[in-house]
């Protein structure tokens, strides 16, 4: 199963060039049964990445373009009057899927954001007092533009904390950008991932089996203590207003277990914790305003924490 999921990265690479870290992060998020926030300027393959991953895993996928006038019912679904029967059957919204691409999630009002939050956290939606379970697996990949703030609604800290990971997609180096152009010159169409030759290598049952296997990955007491010490160090950092909560610690454990399993380990090591720390914690820190003015960022603080906390042998 590990080898097969390794092939997923190969298949996604047929369409997405130069974002190997984000591809691995997406797979980790799915296997850890979490959700992922993708941050990058327009045009760095955020949407293509999500569609390619779903295609390689035979997972149903839907997309919501979040806008200021989007209503909660546009996300979850609603009761619609049927004139032929005189009843109000439930019409499922786009959230009823395996992989949901929530595009520009910060462009919609808090009430609609809350509807997505419930779906992410509870894996169900409530409409007219009735709870309706979502498909299994259910994975949300939400995108944000880091440089455009006009007409946006800041995601509340509670909602940011519900994302297992925040992955940053940077502009590609020159050679990678050339490869992107070469593929388009050869006829690749980004709207049609099948044109890149992506073939499904796993299905829903294999994904569920992998998620169960990840939950069975072990952790030594000293490695758990290492995670606790890292979290406490973020709370004591002078440039941090709010550090990582216990929920952040459990999120790091979940991601480290998924990464350990993917790399062939049956128990997590400090290396797995360190590899996952930045993507799992970068969106959970609140930097003090004076430190922000001096250019201090979450990634820099976390790098310092990694250097300061003793690593178990």
Image (cartoon, helix red, strand yellow):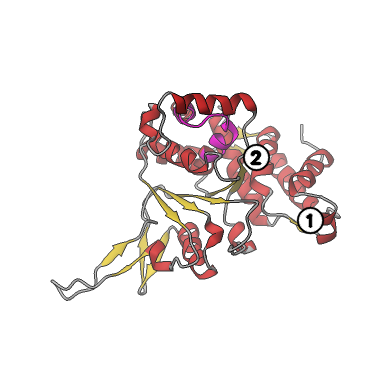
x, y percent for residue 61: 38, 46
The C terminus - image quarter? top right
x, y percent for residue 36: 55, 48
Q: Which residues are magenta?
A: 9-26
Residue in the foreground of this view, choosing between 205 and 19: 19
- Give the residue at x 49% y 52%: 103
Q: Is residue 15 magenta?
A: yes
x, y percent for residue 238: 86, 55
**Badge 2: few (under 14), some or many (20 or more) residues near its Cα, within 10 Å?**
many
Q: Which quadrant of the structure image shows residue 260?
A: top right
Tag 1's secondary structure? Answer: helix
Left or right, 29 with reference to 78: right
Q: Which residue is mark 1?
A: 235
Residue in the foreground of this view, choosing between 187 and 65: 187
Q: Which residue is mark 2?
A: 276
- Give the residue at x 54% y 68%: 110
Count the marks: how many? 2
């Amino acid at each position: 199963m590990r080898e097969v999921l390794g092939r997923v990265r190969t298949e996604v690479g047929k369409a997405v060039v130069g974002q190997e870290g984000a591809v691995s992060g997406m797979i980790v998020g799915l296997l850890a049964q979490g959700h992922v926030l993708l941050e990058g300027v327009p045009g760095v393959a955020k949407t293509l990445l999500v569609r390619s991953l779903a295609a390689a895993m035979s997972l149903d996928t839907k997309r919501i373009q979040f806008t200021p006038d989007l209503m909660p019912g546009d996300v979850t679904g609603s009761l619609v009057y049927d004139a032929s029967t005189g009843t109000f059957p439930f019409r499922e919204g786009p959230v009823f899927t395996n992989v949901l691409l929530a595009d520009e999630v910060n462009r919609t009002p808090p009430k609609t954001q809350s509807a997505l939050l419930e779906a992410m956290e509870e894996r169900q939606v409530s409409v007219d007092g009735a709870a309706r379970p979502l498909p299994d697996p259910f994975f949300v990949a939400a995108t944000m533009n880091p440089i455009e703030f006009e007409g946006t609604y800041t995601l509340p800290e509670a909602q940011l904390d519900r994302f297992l990971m925040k992955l940053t997609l940077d502009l590609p180096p020159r050679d990678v950008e050339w490869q992107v152009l070469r593929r388009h010159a050869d006829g690749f169409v980004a709207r049609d991932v099948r044109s890149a030759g992506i073939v499904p290598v796993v299905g829903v049952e294999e994904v569920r089996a992998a998620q169960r296997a990840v939950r069975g990955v072990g952790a030594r007491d000293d490695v758990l203590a290492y995670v606790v010490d890292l979290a406490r160090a973020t709370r004591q950092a002078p440039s941090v207003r709010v550090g990582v909560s216990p929920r952040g610690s459990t999120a790091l454990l979940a991601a480290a277990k998924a990464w350990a399993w993917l790399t062939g380990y049956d128990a997590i090591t400090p290396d797995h914790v360190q590899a996952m720390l930045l993507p799992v914690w970068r969106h959970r820190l609140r930097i003090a305003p004076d430190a922000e003015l001096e250019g201090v960022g979450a990634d820099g603080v976390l790098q310092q924490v990694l250097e300061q906390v003793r690593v178990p042998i």
